[in-house]
């Protein structure tokens, strides 16, 4: 029985399916780190049955931030975003749970905090569209890329192994 | 009052019970700033060298075995009297003896699985922070 289980997992990983739990990248941005809201934000995830399976605090260089946000290069808000994201340390983490990508986006609320639904992270804790407390991957592909940007596989600790 | 640094570890019991945010927000609400943080599953060697001062004591092997049962969350905290403030927030080693409202009274299940570690003096804080964090992993606030 156990053998069969591992066989199925091995097969699933070949086809890039994740039966155990979806993963997403979350960033607590410099505004929220400075406002001492790291714990508050992580607690919201954990209370929603999402698990933190990798985490590090880091100060992004301009080059790192530009690389992370490469798809926004050339957009009018790009420079402001990079300046903000390098203004202080951030906390990058991998979250795991069922449907966690969509769940995280729902919990964050709209990019513009004035448009974010009540009780979301941004409605409660963010100052503006730029200084908006959190980042979350918007798709499976983005999550994969963003997680690999910050974490080596051996620094990620999935709950179910 | 001088600004101090201290090392905090959220142990495998509290990590597995999804208490990371709860504990970190207690530090932040008390005015302590997180200046370094990482999640790590310690190897036996890591845990033994971290707790080297306890080597030979009767609880040493159990402590090491427990500390490697799952990932831990390691933090460097900075603030006024960070070392004693953190110890006040943690409460007594034995959760049954910990003051009400402390981390261990609220979240720890036993003297072994007691949710958190905190440095006990300035010298140990320095050694413990250096044990887990390289200088470039420490991010003191610049604004």
Image (cartoon, rainbow, N blue to C red):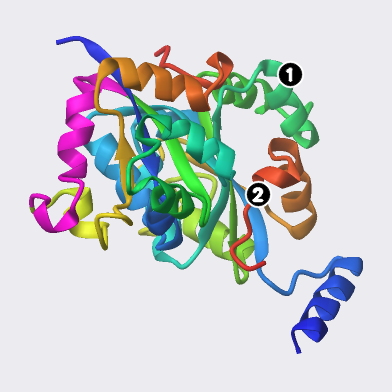
Q: Identify which residue, B126 or A113, lies in the foreground.
A: B126
Magenta part of the chain: B78-99
Tag in front: 1 or 2:
2
Q: Which residue is mark 2?
A: A156
Quick check: A130 left or right of B35? right
Q: Identify which residue, A69 or B98, lies in the foreground.
A: B98
Quarter holding residue A117: bottom left
Q: Identify which residue, A126 or A97, lies in the foreground.
A: A97
Please check the rendered image and state whether residue B84 is part of the magenta-colored stretch, yes or no.
yes
Q: Position of residue B6 (x, y in %)?
A: 32, 24
Q: Residue at x 20, y 58 (%)?
A: B106
Q: Tell me if residue B13 comes above or below residue B63 in the rendering.
A: below
Give yes or no for contact between labels 1 and 2 (Cβ–Cβ under 8 Å).
no
Mark closer to the chain start, 1 or 2:
1
Q: Position of residue A118 (x, y in %)?
A: 37, 59
Q: Secondary structure at mark 2?
A: loop
Q: Position of residue B47 (x, y in %)?
A: 50, 40
The N terminus of chain B lies in quadrant: top left
């Amino acid at each position: 029985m156990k053998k069969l289980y591992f066989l199925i997992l091995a097969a699933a990983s070949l086809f890039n399916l994740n039966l155990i739990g979806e993963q997403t990248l979350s960033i607590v941005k410099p505004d929220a780190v400075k406002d001492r809201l790291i714990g508050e934000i992580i607690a919201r995830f954990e209370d929603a049955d999402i698990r933190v399976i990798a985490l590090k605090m880091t100060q992004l260089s301009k080059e790192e931030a530009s690389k992370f946000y490469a798809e926004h290069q050339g957009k009018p808000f790009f420079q402001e975003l990079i300046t903000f994201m390098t203004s202080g340390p951030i906390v990058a983490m991998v979250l795991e749970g069922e449907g966690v990508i969509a769940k995280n986006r729902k919990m964050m609320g709209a990019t513009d905090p004035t448009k974010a639904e009540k009780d979301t992270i941004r409605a409660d804790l963010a100052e503006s569209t730029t200084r908006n407390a959190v980042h979350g991957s918007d798709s499976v592909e983005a999550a994969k890329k963003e997680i690999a940007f910050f974490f080596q596989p051996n620094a990620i600790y999935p709950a179910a192994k | 009052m001088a600004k101090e640094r201290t090392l905090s570890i959220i142990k495998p019991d509290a990590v597995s019970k999804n208490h990371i945010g709860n504990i970190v927000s207690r530090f932040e609400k008390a005015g302590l700033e997180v200046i370094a943080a990482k999640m790590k599953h310690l190897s036996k060697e890591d845990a033994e060298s971290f707790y080297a001062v306890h080597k030979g004591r009767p609880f040493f092997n159990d402590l090491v075995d427990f500390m490697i049962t799952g990932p831990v969350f390691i933090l460097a905290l900075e603030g006024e009297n960070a070392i004693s403030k953190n110890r006040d927030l943690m409460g007594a080693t034995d959760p049954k003896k910990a003051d009400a409202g402390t981390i261990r009274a609220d979240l720890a299940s036993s003297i072994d699985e007691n949710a958190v570690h905190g440095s006990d003096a300035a010298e140990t804080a320095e050694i413990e922070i250096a044990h887990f964090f390289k200088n470039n992993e420490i991010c003191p606030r610049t604004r």
